[in-house]
Amino acid sequence: MKVKTGDFVTALILLLFGALLFQRCCALRPACIIAGGPVFFPKIIIGIMVLLSLVLIYQSVERTGGKVPGAKARSAADPWQTLVLRWSLVGLVAIYLLVMPWLGYAPATILFLVAAMCMLGPTKPRNIAIYCVVSGAVTGVLYYVFGVMLTVFLP
Amino acid sequence: MFDLSQIFHVLEPLNLLLMFLGVFGGLVIGAMPGLTSTMAVGLLVPVTFGMHVDQGLVTLVAVYIGGISGGLVSATLLNIPGTPSSVATTFDAFPMARRGEAGKALAYGVFASFLGGLFSFFILALVAPALGRFALRFGPYEYFALVIFTLSCIVSISGKSLVKGLLSACVGLLMAMVGVSEPDSVTRFTFGLDALEAGFSVMPVLIGMYAIAQILQDVAFIKKPFNIISANFSPREFLAVAARFRNSVKNLVRSSLIGVGVGILPGVGPGLSNIVAYSQAKSASDDPDSFGQGNPDGIIASESANNAATGGALIPLLTLGIPGDATTMMMLGAFMIHNVQPGPLLMRDNADLVLTIFVAYFVSNIFMLLLQIYFIRVLIKALMVPRYILYPVILAMCGIGCYALNNTMSDVWVFLILGLVGYFFCRQGFPLLPLVLGLILGRMAEDQLRISWVMGHDSLVGYLDRPIALTFLGLSAISVAYALYCKRRARLRSKAGAGAACAS
């Protein structure tokens, strides 16, 4: 028997999430109960979510007697290189957010933009020059709009 | 109800300039494949933070109109709909462009968009005040039932699996519970994080879900250049096409009516209206076989319907505070930032703001027409910007926009983390719309349910005495049951098809 892994795992995560939230609901001790209390509505939603997660688990097991066409098509359109590129971009954004408070908005943004463009696009010297100019211009415009016009205190 | 002198206030030079720039920005972003009108509003919302409420509202409406209309350009020249609302436009606009009539195809689309928008404006101005007055009768029972109806509509039409849609809505509703519950003075589901005490800010979640999820999905095709069909045309050619609309009045009115009607339904909006209008135009045509091979009536149907749907989607937003689609959801978040709470009380107590929105809607449609006639070459140039340059810029803009919301990095982290959650949901086939709608309407649903619980003396039997609430709940049940029926029928058909294929 084959299982549609993505659905199965997601449903399990949601089940665990539901159990965790239910535990938090039980831990809440309000001073007084007004209109059903603070966990009245969340408990209803958690109950529905758990029930639906079980249905999804059932569907993910039951439906796949043979091939799982969705999963195969997706893996074919998603080669290793794209996967690396995708998660490198996420990592780069995370680094950008981490370094922005101590490096400052302008240097961090310029570095992020140039690095991201180099990662995603061609890296000939002419391209890199364009990336630098675009990054500087975009950072400047954003700084002017938010920092000067809207007087937002940027890091 | 309305103080008409307010119209002159809306037409001040600065407001006109903001509308012009808003429409232009929306057109440019909407024209780029993959960047939807939702993203157009999301990217430009932070720029409105520091503005006066009137200026912010006119800019948002202008961006919305521009964002929906911009999809026409890439649909015609690339065969890729710039926004989901232009899917049906590709069916006939691209074949016309391929046979050397790109200018004509664009002209038909531009004028149909304008006339659809204008039609929608009159319906908006007529229906919204009346519906607003009617909605003043709504109490907690009706509001809770309305939220359930909205969620059920969205769940029924979004995604292939009803279970996944419902799960997505549940996750959104639970996310709305995070933070302090004011009636009880109790903090819920924050897991000790101070940043979550005030709950999730709607805008970072919305921007993250739509921007990051979209960009991460597009990474696979990021280096692939677009093949753009060259288009030679002049404003004179545009005007010549306008004269030919005499023959398509029936199609235009029918499609615009479909657009407004579909736009009013929660969760449907311009994304579906163009396809419904196209299929209706095709079945009503004397020459249905020419549809799909470059028939201008196909472009007129699709473009008039999607622009008409914008006015339709604004009706439930303004009168009930219920967003019709992802873009109006983004606008609801932006309205809240400007301390404007859409709903029946807005119509009664802030009629001047409603009038501002109406006027901005009308003027933005005129700007949309003029900009597309005289600056369409700029939009075509926008298609040529490589995505490996565009996407990092969008990420930086989204990041700084989320930061500017509350001057805090925690909102930017919410943008990134919830964006990844959105991407994961998309990959697994979970629709995002129910999730974000659950997040926006969750607190409202909880409050109204709890009040109705108290009014019914700790029971929900009070719903049985409320015909409007019962109607909404009944419609919710019907929409879910109908979706289940359609999905079951589709499954049986595909099984029958597979069986026939095996037998042959």
Image: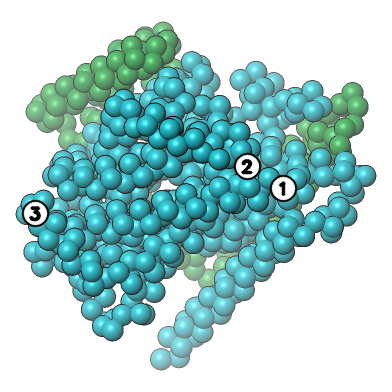
Chain colours: A green, B cyan
Query: Which residue bears the numbered disc 3?
Result: B236
Query: Which residue bears the numbered disc 1?
Result: B138
State the quadrant of the N terminus of chain A: bottom right
Residue B83: percent from left, percent from top = 34, 51
Q: Chain of mark 2?
A: B
* Circle 3: element type: helix
Task: First in sequence, mark 2 or 1: give its number.
Answer: 1
Q: Residue at x 69, y 37 (%)?
A: B443
Rounded to the nearest angstrom, the CA distance separating label 2 from label 1 is 9 Å
Residue B46 visible at all: no
Which kind of residue does numbered mark 3 sit on? Arg
Rounded to the nearest angstrom, the CA distance separating label 3 from label 1 is 52 Å
Residue A3: percent from left, percent from top = 58, 61
Q: Residue at x 35, y 80 (%)?
A: B284
Task: First in sequence, mark 3 or 1: give its number.
Answer: 1
Relative depth, front residue between B422 and B126? B126
Task: First in sequence, mark 3 or 2: give its number.
Answer: 3
Outermost residue, bottom direction?
A: B504
3 and 1 marks in contact (CB < 8 Å):
no
10 Å neighbourhood of mark 3: few (<14), some, or many (≥20)?
few
* Circle 1: element type: loop
Relative depth, front residue between A72 and B70? B70
- The reply to the same-chain question for discs 3 and 1 is yes
* Circle 2: element type: helix
2 and 1 marks in contact (CB < 8 Å):
yes
Q: Chain of mark 3?
A: B
Q: Residue at x 28, y 64 (%)?
A: B300
Residue B234: percent from left, percent from top = 8, 52
Which kind of residue does numbered mark 2 sit on? Pro
Rounded to the nearest angstrom, the CA distance separating label 3 from label 2 is 45 Å
Query: Which residue bears the numbered disc 2?
Result: B344
Residue B167: percent from left, percent from top = 64, 51
